[in-house]
């Protein structure tokens, strides 16, 4: 869901979260790498490499949000907000690849048998899981607060690391307690969960890039705001599309047919202001003003008190 947080504040929050994510993953890469060298554990070494790829995903998110914050230009008159779902789409690909790699490792363990894990490697893995889960929750809260699909995708990516590490740790410990099949079975289960998460992120990004409509409650708020403006006799049509962290709205309203173009224009400007107050995520509202002359019986258009309206006549639109 888009957010009313200002663009500059939003970018600062994303940059701060990105710096924290990179710092955590860099620290975990070093810690896991050192534990892998000390214990000779290839599983822990794979976890270290995974933390390295998480840094790449975070850089993609930060780059996407920076591009999304750019103002409109001659080549992108509607702005660059769709860079965020594009970044989320890339993160979805990274998560999907991580799921495939986890599955491949599980199949390899199924053939070769579980790898024992030392106490130091187990401690490092457990601590890193706690750190990554805390980071994932922080990113998830931030992503929901600012309406960033890219940050939410990065939160899901951090959680895949927790799942993969949990599978490796549980499987290795299971091998020590006489349950050798626990390692590959846990790996296959987690692989399926990660794949589902990655494909879900990818599909959500595709939906955002296809100009999906906001949720029904937001659409209802848009319509109520337009209908609340004095002089609006009917709301003939409201269309809206999610554009990255923003919403763009097209609205048709009917006013009394005897009004001058200037008077209709003023009402259209009030409709735009009312909609943007009611739904602060709206980046722009295009209002088209029609002359009101009543609707045919049986119409279900929304109207003001005791009236109905339609998309009739040829009063020029108010372009805002």
Image (spheres, helix red, strand yellow):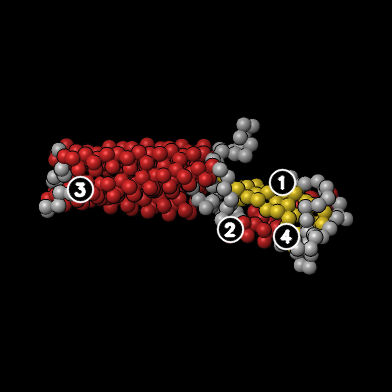
Can residue 199 be seen here? The reply is yes
In the image as oriented, which residue stretches furthest toward the top? 75
According to the picture, the residue beneath numbered tag 2 turns out to be 216
Q: Dots 1 and 3: beta carbons under 8 Å? A: no
Disc 3 and disc 2: Cα gap in Å? 45 Å
Secondary structure beneath label 3: helix
Of circles 1 and 4, the one toward us is: 4
According to the picture, the residue beneath numbered tag 4 turns out to be 301
Q: Is residue 169 above or below residue 91?
A: below
According to the picture, the residue beneath numbered tag 3 turns out to be 183
Disc 1 and disc 4: Cα gap in Å? 23 Å
Disc 4 and disc 3: Cα gap in Å? 60 Å
Of circles 2 and 4, the one toward us is: 4
Left or right? Give the position of 201 relative to 257: left
Dot 2: few (<14), some (14–19), or many (≥20) neighbours within 10 Å?
Answer: few
In the image as oriented, which residue stretches furthest toward the bottom? 306
């Amino acid at each position: 869901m888009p957010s009313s947080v200002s663009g500059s504040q939003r970018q600062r929050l994303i940059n701060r979260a990105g710096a924290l994510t990179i710092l955590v993953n860099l620290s975990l890469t070093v810690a896991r790498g050192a534990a892998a060298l000390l214990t000779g554990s290839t599983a822990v070494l794979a976890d270290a490499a995974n933390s390295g790829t998480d840094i790449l995903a975070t850089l993609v998110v930060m780059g996407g949000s920076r591009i999304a914050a750019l103002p409109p230009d001659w080549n992108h008159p509607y702005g660059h907000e769709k860079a965020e779902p594009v970044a989320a789409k890339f993160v979805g690909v990274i998560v999907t690849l991580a799921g495939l790699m986890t599955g491949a490792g599980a199949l390899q363990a199924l053939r070769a048998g579980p790898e024992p894990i030392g106490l130091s490697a187990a401690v490092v893995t457990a601590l890193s899981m706690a750190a990554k889960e805390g980071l994932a929750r922080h990113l998830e809260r931030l992503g929901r607060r600012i309406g960033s699909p890219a940050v939410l995708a990065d939160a899901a990516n951090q959680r895949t690391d927790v799942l993969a590490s949990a599978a490796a740790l549980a499987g290795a410990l299971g091998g020590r307690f006489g349950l050798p099949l626990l390692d590959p079975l846990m790996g296959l289960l987690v692989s399926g969960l990660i794949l589902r998460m990655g494909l879900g992120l990818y599909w959500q990004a595709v939906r955002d890039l296809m100009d999906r409509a906001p949720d029904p409650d937001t659409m209802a708020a848009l319509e109520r705001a337009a209908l609340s403006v004095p002089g609006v006799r009917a709301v003939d049509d409201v269309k809206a599309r999610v554009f990255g962290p923003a919403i763009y709205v097209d609205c048709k309203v009917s006013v009394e047919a005897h009004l001058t173009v200037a008077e209709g224009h003023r009402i259209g400007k009030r409709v735009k202001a009312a909609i943007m107050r009611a739904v602060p995520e709206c980046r722009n509202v295009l209002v088209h003003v029609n002359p009101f002359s009543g609707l045919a019986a049986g119409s279900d258009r929304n109207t003001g008190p005791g009236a109905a309206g339609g998309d009739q006549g040829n009063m020029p639109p108010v372009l805002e």
